[in-house]
Amino acid sequence: MRSLHRHPLKSALGEEIALARVTERGLDGDRVRALLDTATGRLVSAKNPRLWRALLTVAARTTPHGIRLLAADGRELDEAGLTALLGREVRAVDAPPPGAELERSVPEAVLDRGVEVDVPSTVHAFGGAAPPGTFFDFAPVHLVSTATLAALGADTGGGGPAEAARYRPNLVVDTPGERGFPENGWVGRELLIGDAVRLEVLAATPRCAVPTLAHGALPRDPEALRAAARLNRVEPLPGMGPMPCAGVYARVLAGGSVRRGDAVSLR
């Protein structure tokens, strides 16, 4: 295992960790809170960059006293501070309201017209393969391989692997000697991590506009999506049609602890 990541607040910057407890709801402390747009009742997601891309300047940190939210200048943010930063009234929630939805801007339209333009969008329920009451887009664990990051980085001419933070995985899996997108071959199989944690890989991860956005100090990079479109258009689930994908979603079959450096094997 190359690295572990959690994102305490949905669509805010995450944190890299050395050890995590894994349960049926994913890594402990991951996506345990989200913001609600009080005007629409929808969950806030940077999948709509025009409205919410500024949330990717906010660092979410797990502390013994709860989640701390820090602005780029180090100021601690409460709901009023988040409302001022985002330009819309928001409130923090610990569980999605009944029937909660989020808005996803059409990624190609964002690439063509920019992040500040009101582009066509779709509205989605979420968490189809996650436990009720959670904030996951689809499933509770998201993995990406070092081979995938290397392929994306090489295609964009970045001089090295793509930054994992752009793709917001929980687990970055070392795949020495592999090329391309080996996770595509994991779908329908199990991964064993360390001695106990077992994951069932469900689907390739379709990419939205989020990887193209500035993430903290990382600048905006439209090639982060275009590279996936050029290299790895696959069908995540039957009936969805080919989409730019990078990484895979998984559900937890057996929990336990995972650590940076744990062995990962395919079953």
Image (spheres, helix red, strand yellow):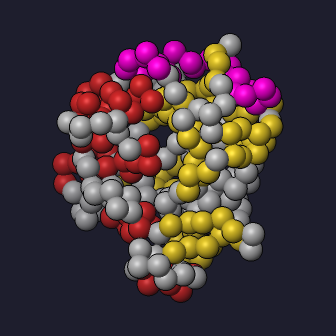
Q: Which residues are magenta?
A: 176-198
Front residue of 249 and 103: 249
- Residue at 77 percent of width and 39 percent of height: 257
Residue 62's quadrant in the figure?
Answer: bottom right
Front residue of 240 and 153: 153
Query: Which quarter of the image is occupied by the C terminus?
Result: top right
- Residue at 71 percent of width and 62 percent of height: 95
Can the viewer see residue 131? no
Residue 59: x, y in percent? 50, 67
**235 lies above or below 45:** above
Query: Which quarter of the image is occupied by the N terminus?
Result: top right
Can the viewer see residue 191? yes
**94 lies above or below 88:** above
Residue 244's quadrant in the figure?
Answer: top left
Residue 41: x, y in percent? 57, 68
Q: Is residue 87 shown in magenta?
A: no
